[in-house]
């Protein structure tokens, strides 16, 4: 069951990510809440995109807020990332990016 508060936070933060990093080269998946395409590069239109990032909502929201680093979460196996562009470390935390 999806928590409405978590759903709202995930969807709004993914929308901000797509706004700050527009494009269709990377798919960021936060199951079962939402997914978004973002990032400059080759446009993905069908099937599984070449650059996919997936993690739990808890980990995503910690990254967005700066409570955890991408490097730590990735090294702990909390992020699944495939493809040459599947790294958002330069964009996180989102709160700091949005304020600047």
Image (cartoon, rainbow, N blue to C red):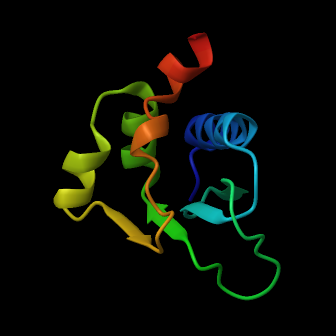
Residue that sits furthest to the top in the current view: 99
- Tell me if 68 is positioned left or right of 11 in this view: left
- Tell me if 10 is positioned left or right of 16 in this view: left
In the rendered image, the quadrant that contains the C terminus is: top right
Task: Point out residue 94 in the picture as x, y percentages from the top left corner.
Answer: 52, 28
Q: How many marks?
A: 0
Q: Is residue 95 above or below residue 20?
A: above
User: In front here: 94 or 59?
Assistant: 94
Task: Point out residue 9 in the picture as x, y percentages from the top left corner.
Answer: 60, 34
Q: Residue at x 41, y 68 (%)?
A: 81
Q: Residue at x 58, y 11 (%)?
A: 99
Q: Residue at x 36, y 47 (%)?
A: 59
Quadrant of residue 37 within the rendered picture:
bottom right
Residue that sits furthest to the bottom in the current view: 47
Task: Point out residue 42 in the picture as x, y percentages from the top left corner.
Answer: 72, 70
Q: Is residue 38 above or below residue 61?
A: below
Q: Is residue 87 above or below residue 45?
A: above
Quadrant of residue 62 within the rendered picture:
top left
User: In front here: 24 or 64?
Assistant: 24
- Tell me if 4 is positioned left or right of 30 in this view: right
Quadrant of residue 90 within the rendered picture:
top left
- Tell me if 24 is positioned left or right of 93 in this view: right
Task: Point out residue 22 in the picture as x, y percentages from the top left corner.
Answer: 75, 46
In the rendered image, the quadrant that contains the N terminus is: bottom right
């Amino acid at each position: 069951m999806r928590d409405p508060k978590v759903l709202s936070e995930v969807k709004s933060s993914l929308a901000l990510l797509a706004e700050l990093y527009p494009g269709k080269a990377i798919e960021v998946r936060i199951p079962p809440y939402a997914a978004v395409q973002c990032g400059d590069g080759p446009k993905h239109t069908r099937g599984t995109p070449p650059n996919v990032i997936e993690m739990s909502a808890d980990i995503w929201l910690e990254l967005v807020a700066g409570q955890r680093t991408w490097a730590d979460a990735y090294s702990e196996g909390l992020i699944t990332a495939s493809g040459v562009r599947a790294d958002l470390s330069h964009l996180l935390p989102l709160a700091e990016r949005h304020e600047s």
